[in-house]
Amino acid sequence: MNRPRDLGVLLDMAERQRDDAARALARMRQERRAAQGQMDQLHAYTRDAEQRWQQRATVGVSPTLLATHRQFMLKLEEAIAFQSNVLQQLDDRIARQEGHLLEAERHLATLQRVQQRWQREWQQHQQRVEQKANDEMAATLHRRRHHPHA
């Protein structure tokens, strides 16, 4: 039996792919946290604007001011809808990247198992060769002791 092939280069490449996938996922999650922070700010700004409007409305407002407020609130709603879309796209990308990472981890684990199996088979082969050599040496010694002139 020949010495087992070394999967070192393939293992290194698989580890790099796994690490790259993990880094990409971490970047996407960071981007998602930042986008969620922007969404939270938009919601907070909307609440603040509504509270200010309610306070101002108690003393009366002009039709122009009312129209301006409605237009402003529509712009905020559009920004929130846009940001919701951004978050959904990021969630989708994160889910895909998690799949890529899982696949890279599986590939690496498969290569590691193959390498380990080859190493085990090689060691077992070496042990059998060594045992055979020991058995032959013992048989030779036994023949010499019991049949010195043969």
Image: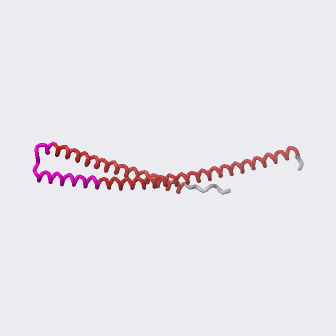
- Residue at image position (41%, 52%) is 25
- Residue at image position (23%, 52%) is 76
- Residue at image position (45%, 52%) is 19
Residue 124 point in image, percent of width and height:
68, 49
**Image color mode:** secondary structure
Q: In which quarter of the image is residue 81?
A: bottom left
Main secondary structure along the magenta-highlighted residues: helix
- Residue at image position (75%, 49%) is 133
Q: In this view, does 146 lie above or below 103?
A: above
Q: What stretch is highlighted in magenta?
A: 55-82
Front residue of 141 and 91: 91
Residue 66 point in image, percent of width and height:
14, 51
- Left or right of residue 114, residue 29 in this image: left
Answer whether residue 142 is magenta in the image: no
Front residue of 101 and 41: 41
- Left or right of residue 97, residue 143 in this image: right
Front residue of 47 and 25: 47
Front residue of 106 and 85: 85
* Count of numbered circles in the view: 0
Answer whether residue 75 is magenta in the image: yes
Residue 123 point in image, percent of width and height:
66, 49
Residue 1 point in image, percent of width and height:
68, 56
